[in-house]
Image (cartoon, rainbow, N blue to C red):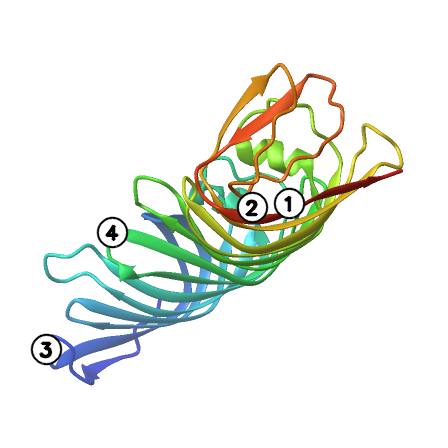
Amino acid sequence: MREPMSGRTAPDSNGFGRAIDIGSLNVDESDPPFRFRNVRGRLKLLADSAWLDFLHWDLPASSGAAKGKVVWGGPLPIRYDVAVRGDSVALNDVNWVYPNLPKTGGGKVLLTISNKRDVHVMDYKLAQMDMRSDGSHLTGDMTFGVGAPVLQLRNVDLIASPLDFTFIHTMNGKPLPIDWEGQIYGSVRASGGPLTDFEVDAARAEWRDSHVPGAVSRFSGSGGRQPSIRYGPTCAFTTRTFSIAMAQESRRGCLEVVGSRMARTSLPMMSR
């Protein structure tokens, strides 16, 4: 690490600071948990603040650049406002955001790390995302909020081409109660919220069921979702919430989705 100059800079908490040119730097960060290698760029330090402009960084299987500010003074938690360009991002390097994120695959993304909205909740805004994992290809934007009692997912604007049920099983942390398989092609826009109270503005998709060759289900919907899921002796579906049910036979039974909030739903059209 080189430090070619230091001196007076624009004031933050006081009037003195340092500018450090970094030729190569390795850093292990605990929160968020990153293991940076081969960091190159400039770091400006002034009292309780740091401005970073890193032209390059490596994680174990990822690389990119980053620019932003970190503030640690006062009684509040550390404040982050950092924009990261992920030229090549491996999900295994970032799956700590949500324990059930896949550990295989990756892609490209523009990531903003910030807790400006709530200093106790770290927002990870993924923009211009282009990711592949578990037979799925997802593009678009979404924001994870980490630190609240329930994981938050906001400002979702995604296209799936496709979303494979293998990915859904992985995100669920275990196989779904019903043995759904196949690929979903479609899009979703959602203002979102905590996963226990999620708002969908518009969703449209086509499900190609691999259990039944040639079977295709098409559906669309919008609304809030706060369901409980359980088995029932017969197929019982409700459209009082965002509950879109594939009305076809399953190898293991039927699914009943019951909720409490009003929504608009277009039930699936089955074709073979």
Residue closest to the eye, 212 or 88: 212
Quadrant including the C terminus:
top right
Residue of label 2: 91
Residue at mark 1 to residue at mark 3: CA–CA distance: 45 Å
Answer with mark 3 or mark 4, whichever residue precedes in sequence.
3
Element carrying mark 4: loop
The secondary element bearing badge 1 is classed as loop
Image quarter (top left, top right, bottom left or bottom right) of the N terminus: bottom left
Whichever of callouts 1 and 3 sits on the residue coming sooner in the sequence is 3
Q: What whole-number distance in Å separates the C-alpha atoms at marks 3 and 4?
A: 26 Å
Which amino acid type corresponds to the residue marked 4 in the rendered image? His
Find disc 3 in the rendering and name its residue.
14
Q: Position of residue 34 (x, y in %)?
A: 41, 49
Give percent across and percent down for residue 139: 64, 58
* Gap between marks 2 and 3 measured at Cα: 40 Å
The correct choice, above or below, for 160 with respect to 7 in the image is above
Task: Residue under label 4, please give it.
Answer: 120
How many residues crowd mark 1 within 10 Å: few (<14), some (14–19), many (20+)? some
Q: Earlier in the sequence, mark 2 or mark 3?
A: 3
Element at label 2: helix
Front in this rendered view, residue 2 or 242 = 242
The residue identified by callout 1 is: 105
- Per the model, the C-alpha gap separating discs 4 and 1 is 30 Å
Q: Nearer the viewer, mark 3 or mark 4?
A: 4
Give the Cα distance between marks 2 and 4.
24 Å
Marks 2 and 4, the one that precedes in the sequence: 2
Which residue appears at 57% of the width and 40% of the height? 239
